[in-house]
Amino acid sequence: MTPVNRILVQQIMRDAILRCLPQSAPAALNPVAEAIHNSPAAARIKEEMIRVGKKLWERQYVDGNGGNISYRIGQEYVICTPTMCSKGDLAPEDLSLINMENARVCGDRPHTSEVLLHLEIYKAVPQARAVIHCHPPHATAYAITGLTPPGNVIPEQEVFVGPLAITPYETPGTKRFAETVLPYAQKHNTILLGNHGIVCWADTLTHAEWLVEIVDTYCRTIMLAQSLGPIKNIAADKVTDLLEIKKKLGFPDCRFTEQESAPAEPFLAMADVCRAGEPSAHGDGKEPVSQEQVEDLITKMTDQVMELLSKTE
Ligand SMILES: [Zn+2]
């Protein structure tokens, strides 16, 4: 082998590696994201996501591959469920880490296209750490009629959810669909998606799943009550009491003023959940691969190819 051959091989390696850099093995090129994805905090969140997925499936809030779940870990990243997977069959390796621009940075399985909806909520509502989109039958029944259930009827609904908003229909998975929630996301933690289903956000995955349960049971109960006779409302002064409780708990409500709807501290507690897993306090996961790392990779691969060639001569 002459030195010229090595230079040629090195050039081929360089061209191939540089051509592949933006798309191939992003996790290996993003040590911050990799550290977060493999952190103990992420492992706990993935376990919780799997539990929540099972509950959604067992309660028939998702069918087939329907629904999707995500969790915002730190400021820059979101753990989310894959496309084409039953929420009753999730495994930790199915869950990907994406960034706030919807690019998958860790994980082998393509993530759900409907995560665009989740990302719009995370960007609009900083206190949202978990988002669930699903199709619970009773709430979805309202969503396909364009109706919302009457309010001020059951205390739990008023305190944890409140008046329901409903979005106009848009094609699922599109940016336009994702943006339909923007007028409502800050003042409603649960939104009916026109001709589709619902979306809920909360401080934890478990709490977001509770909201799904609360709203679907509420819609079902209203339907049952309406078949019996006129529904009685809770008295206005008693509703005021419920809203006072709601303010203390830090839940949003479209009946609150701007000052009243300031996020409560508990919502922010999980914001830095992954700090311990991050190798750098300043790392934002977007650092490009250094020239030194690229050159090191080219040299190592060239060495390996040269060694292989020398054996085949
Ligand atoms: Zn859907």
Image: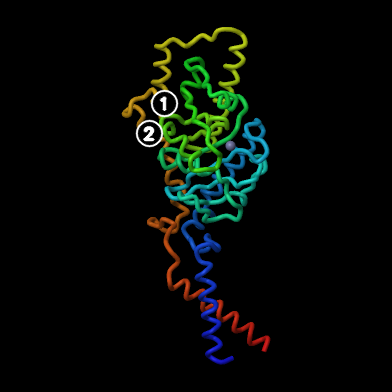
Determine the image quadrant of residue 12. bottom right
In this picture, is 152 found above or below 209?
above
Residue 105 badge:
none
Instruction: Kindly identify the amino acid type of the residue bearing the numbered disc 2.
Output: Pro
Q: Count up the numbered dots.
A: 2
Q: Quadrant of ligand 1?
A: top right
In this picture, is 52 found above or below 286?
above
- Mark 1 and mark 2: Cα distance apart in space: 11 Å
Crowding at label 2, few (<14), some or many (≥20) Cα neighbours within 10 Å?
A: some
Furthest residue in direction bottom, as rendered: 2
Tell me the quarter of the image containing the N terminus: bottom right
- Identify the element where label 1 is drawn: loop
Residue at figure coordinates x 68%, y 86% from the top left:
312
Q: Which residue matches tag 2? A: 263
Residue 257 lies, in percent from the top left, at 33, 25
Q: Which residue matches tag 1? A: 253
Residue 235 lies, in percent from the top left, at 44, 10
Q: Is residue 214 left or right of residue 292?
A: right
Residue at figure coordinates x 54%, y 44% from the top left:
45
Residue 226 lies, in percent from the top left, at 59, 12
- Identify the element where label 2 is drawn: loop
Furthest residue in direction left, as rendered: 259
Instruction: Kindly identify the amino acid type of the residue bearing the numbered disc 1.
Output: Asp
